[in-house]
């Protein structure tokens, strides 16, 4: 039996960004290793507790949330998903 044809759905690629509270980060690197986009890195500078905090490289996040779920420190990472056409805030 024939089925009614429908227009193909356009795939919209998710985009996002993350905000990292440097003083909550213990520099464990779990998020860096887990990010499929490789857009996180540890910094050479130290935070106030003597850890090398993680940093978002500034582009490429797809808001998958894996870094959030891999981080053992509550409140260190917040993931934001961008609407279509929306741009991340300038840091
Ligand atoms: S939300 Fe996903 S893509 Fe974005 S920084 Fe975290 S792990 Fe990487
Ligand atoms: S997983 Fe959390 S504590 Fe570890 S480096 Fe990333 S933000 Fe810091």
Image: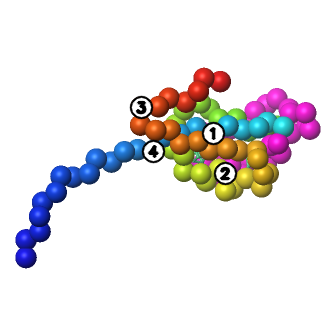
Residue reaching furthest to the bottom: 1
Work out whether mark 2 precedes mark 3 in sequence or the reverse, and give the earlier one: 2
How many marks do you count on the picture? 4
Alpha carbons under labels 1 and 4: distance apart: 13 Å
Which label belongs to residue 67? none
Residue stretch in magenta = 24-51
The residue identified by callout 3 is 85
Work out whether mark 3 precedes mark 4 in sequence or the reverse, and give the earlier one: 4
| Residue at left offset 75%, top offset 33% | 43
Front-most of residues 68 and 1: 1
The residue identified by callout 2 is 68
Q: Main secondary structure of the magenta part?
A: loop
Q: Residues within 10 Å of mark 4 (few under 14, many from 20)?
A: few
The residue identified by callout 4 is 14
The residue identified by callout 1 is 18
Residue 40 on image: x %, y %: 64, 40
| Residue at left offset 90%, top offset 33% | 48
Alpha carbons under labels 4 and 2: distance apart: 16 Å
Alpha carbons under labels 3 and 1: distance apart: 17 Å
Work out whether mark 1 precedes mark 2 in sequence or the reverse, and give the earlier one: 1
Q: Residues within 10 Å of mark 1 (few under 14, many from 20)?
A: many
């Amino acid at each position: 039996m024939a089925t009614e044809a429908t227009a193909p759905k356009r795939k919209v690629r998710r985009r996002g960004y993350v905000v990292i509270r440097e003083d909550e980060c213990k520099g464990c690197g779990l998020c860096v290793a887990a990010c499929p986009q490789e857009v996180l890195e540890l910094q050479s500078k130290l935070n106030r507790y003597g850890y090398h905090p993680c940093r978002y490289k500034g582009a490429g996040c797809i808001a998958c949330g894996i870094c959030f779920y891999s981080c053992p420190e509550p409140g260190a990472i917040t993931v934001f998903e961008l609407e279509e056409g929306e741009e991340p805030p300038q840091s």
